[in-house]
Image (cartoon, rainbow, N blue to C red):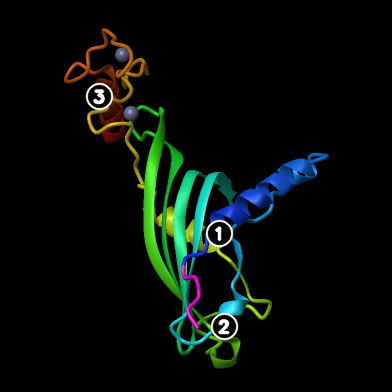
Amino acid sequence: MLRKPHAPFFGNLLLCYNAISLNNTGGDIMAKPANLLLLDVGFIAHEEVGYVRTFDFELPEIVLEGDFVLSNLSGEITFSRTSDGLLAQAEFSAITEATCGRCLDAVYQPLESRFSELFTLPSQADKDTDLVLPANGKIDFAPILRDYMLLEVPINSLCRPECLGLCPECGVNRNHQSCDCIIGSGDPRSSALKSMLNDEAH
Ligand SMILES: [Zn+2]
Ligand SMILES: [Zn+2]
């Protein structure tokens, strides 16, 4: 029997969101929001090999472990039933806030990641090496997404390629402000460094 391969999971997420805000009587829910990346996929294990189901995501913001905040998270995960488990093929994009390595301004860093993971059925798993489909059929995708998105964060983000950075003398952000500091051969820091080196040499 053919089944709908691309069910609109987003609708469920929205319902979930509404339910949360309606019942939000205290600070508890804000402090510990429902994990919208906890996916109940156990039923796919009972489907025939070749069955495919896609989950869509659109989240304005999600806070992952270690205060790793992703905004405008958008993506999908396609689960395929294979002979030994569930193959998850994911594609996500989001924005995270980083700091410019030169001027320290906030940078809205776009991130994109595509990855796949095989979740082996518990009966067929090699305990040491495999990701195993949990017995309750629920896969928490939050830590997996976090790991892959973190890989996409540049070590040194720049607000723009031609960022002028901070003045090493007075510290002004040279993208926004100019200063009269003279930098170069007459740099007092380099002469200070020279005299320190000279002192050490004696
Ligand atoms: Zn910058
Ligand atoms: Zn300056």
Side (left or right) of 98 relative to 132? left
Residue 124 higher or lower than 65, as above or below: below
Counting residues from the start of the chain, the first of labels 1 and 2 encountered is: 1
Give how far across and how far down residue 84 sits, in percent. 48, 88
User: CB of mark 1 within 8 Å of CB of mark 2?
Assistant: no
Which residue, given by chain and number where applicable, does mark 3 sit on?
Answer: 190
Q: Which residues are magenta?
A: 1-5
Residue 19 higher or lower than 131, as above or below: above
Element under disc 2:
helix
Q: Residue at x 43, y 60 (%)?
A: 148
Give how far across and how far down residue 149 sits, in percent. 44, 54
Element under disc 3:
helix
> Is the residue at mark 2 in contact range of ligand 1, meaning its CB lies under 8 Å from it?
no
Going by the picture, which residue comes out furthest to the top?
180
Q: Residues within 10 Å of mark 1 (few under 14, many from 20)?
A: some
Which secondary structure dominates the residues rendered in magenta?
Answer: loop
Which residue, given by chain and number where applicable, does mark 2 sit on?
Answer: 45
Give how far across and how far down residue 178 sits, in percent. 28, 10
Which residue, given by chain and number where applicable, does mark 1 sit on?
Answer: 9
Give how far across and how far down residue 51 sits, in percent. 47, 80
Instruction: Classify the position of ligand 2 by quadrant: top left, top right, bottom left or bottom right.
Output: top left
Q: Nearer the viewer, residue 193 or 173?
A: 173
Of labels 1 and 3, the one closer to you: 1
Of labels 1 and 2, the one closer to you: 1
Q: Amino acid at mark 2?
A: Ala
Q: Residue at x 41, y 36 (%)?
A: 108
Going by the picture, which residue comes out furthest to the left?
185
Q: Amino acid at mark 3?
A: Ser
Going by the picture, which residue comes out furthest to the right?
25
Q: Residues within 10 Å of mark 3 (few under 14, many from 20)?
A: few
Q: Residue at x 45, y 85 (%)?
A: 82
